[in-house]
Each structure stands twice: as C-alpha cells, then as structure tokens.
Amino acid sequence: MSNKDQISNKEFADIVRSARGNRSLREYAEAAGVSYMTIYKAERGDYVPSSKAIKKMSTGSANPQNGVTYEDMMVAAGYQDKETVSETASILAEHMVEESYFNYDNQQDITVNPKGFSIAGNRGRVDYLEYERRVTGILLSSMMQNNIYFSNNRDYDGYIRSRMPDVILDIKKTQITKWWFEIKYFQEHRRFTPINMQLTLANALVYPSSKTTKGSIVVNNKEAYGFLARRAYQMAYRGELSVILVDDNNQKVVAERYLSNYFEGDHSLEFLLV
C-alpha cells in the first residue's frame, strides 16, 4: 500500500468513526444496510469501500452522526476531486451570501447595508457581493478539504444587525463550535492604507468572544495580511482570532496566522486552514 493510499484510508477511517458516533460497529452496520466487516475494516483503515456502500453508510437510515454527509465521505474516500469540492463549496457560498443580504434587506428601513453600498444597487455593491461569494467559496472549500465540518449559523444573538461578521458557521467535532469571518475587499488598483485595516480590526474586536468561538479577518492583499500578522499577540483581546490571506484569482487560501488566543499563551485550540 502506497503512502498516499495509507493517508486516504486513515482519513476515511476517521470520518466513518465520526459518522458511527456512539453506536456500536454492528448497530451502525445494520442501520446502513452493510456488513459488519465493511465498517470494521473501514475504521481500521484496511480499505475504502465502493461508492455504492458509502452512499448506504452516509444517507437514509444510516443516520450519520456529527454532521457527516455523503459528500464528506466521498471526498475522504478519494472519489471526489478538489474541483468537485470547489464546485460544491461555491454553490453553498452563493446560497449563504444571498440569504445573508436578503435577510438584512428585509429587516432594515435604512438605505445603507453593512458594507456601505446602496440597497438600490450600484456597481460597487455588485462587485463586493461577487467577491464575497468567491471568498466564501474558497473558505468553505478549504474547510471541506481539511475535514472541518460546518453548517450555516442563522442565530445572530449578540450581534447588532448593522455590525456583524460576513459569515458565521457552526463548527462540528472540534473544540471550536462557532467560527465567524470578516471579509475585507481590496481592489487591485487601489493602494493599501493601514487605516482600513485598523478600522476592520477595531470592528472585529467588538464581536462577542468565548473560548469556543473563533474569528478570522480575511484579506486578499499581502500588505494587509502582513500589517495584521505583525500585531499578533499585541492587542488586549481575549478570544481566538486569526488573519487569513486568500488568492481569489487562483481560488485558494494562501496563509493563516493567529493574532490572539482566549487563554493567553495557550495554543491548544488553534487549527488552521493551511
């Protein structure tokens, strides 16, 4: 067995174990309609079952636990490539961004949305919405590829509707249960100015924090990323906070750096997209 196969089998074993949850091997096998040995060998990392068996293990009466989906299993098994993952993430991102702005528009009497673009519509708002959709897709795709399980969070308690993160996700199977993202748009032809990042950071620091909540400021500009990264652990903030650099042209996360932790000096909750 090659090293690549061993890694793939281990990833699949982990996700099957998560899908089984607290049930016994036999209980899960019976619910999924597959043999006991299929589950046993899959969890041992001895082999990856067929796509037909995976569908049985991840849908219907199998009732996979911990938010594991058919797509999660197929990706971990190596049956879906990164292109398929990116396409799935892009669709999810589009729905999330549209829902977020639709809900906001329906709850506001004022004529300005959280990003300062006219609700009536102008080119700036259209460009930003498209950028936010692309970047959200990049983030979701990276999370899927790293087996970080999530769902869209619709509970905005603790946030002011005019001042809330662009994306809020519920995270499963980690010590972090909620992850919000503040997405900053830097147009290629505009020069970076520190004041923009200082304002973004100031806004982010007022969002509710806890030991199980992580926040990330997402930028597409290397200077902006470096500006925040140089301030790591230099701010009076109690929370899990990071800065993420994305390349929206090549659709990937380039770097991530933690800026602070809930427990000072304790990095045990840190997990990164790269």
Image (tube, rainbow, N blue to C red):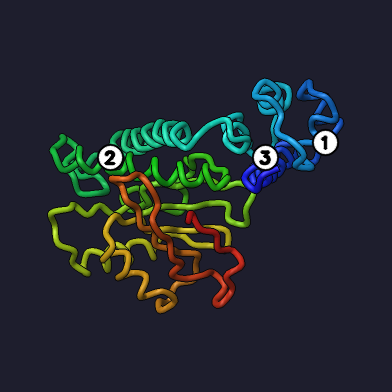
At 34% from the left and 69% from the top, the residue drawn is: 228
> Viewer-nearest of labels 2 and 1?
1
Image spot of residue 52 (x, y percent): 67, 20
Q: Earlier in the sequence, mark 3 or mark 2?
A: 3
Query: Could you tell me the amino acid type at mark 1?
Result: Tyr
At 32% from the left and 69% from the top, the residue drawn is: 226
Query: Could you tell me the amino acid type at mark 2?
Result: Gln
Q: Earlier in the sequence, mark 1 or mark 3?
A: 3
What residue does disc 2 label? 108
Q: CA distance from mark 3 to mark 2?
A: 45 Å
Decide: few, some or many residues near mark 2? Use Cα within 10 Å; few <14, some 14-19, many ≥20.
few
Q: In the displayed structure, does residue 37 sit left or right of residue 42?
A: right
Q: Earlier in the sequence, mark 2 or mark 1?
A: 1
What residue does disc 3 label? 12
What residue does disc 1 label? 40
Q: Secondary structure at mark 1?
A: helix
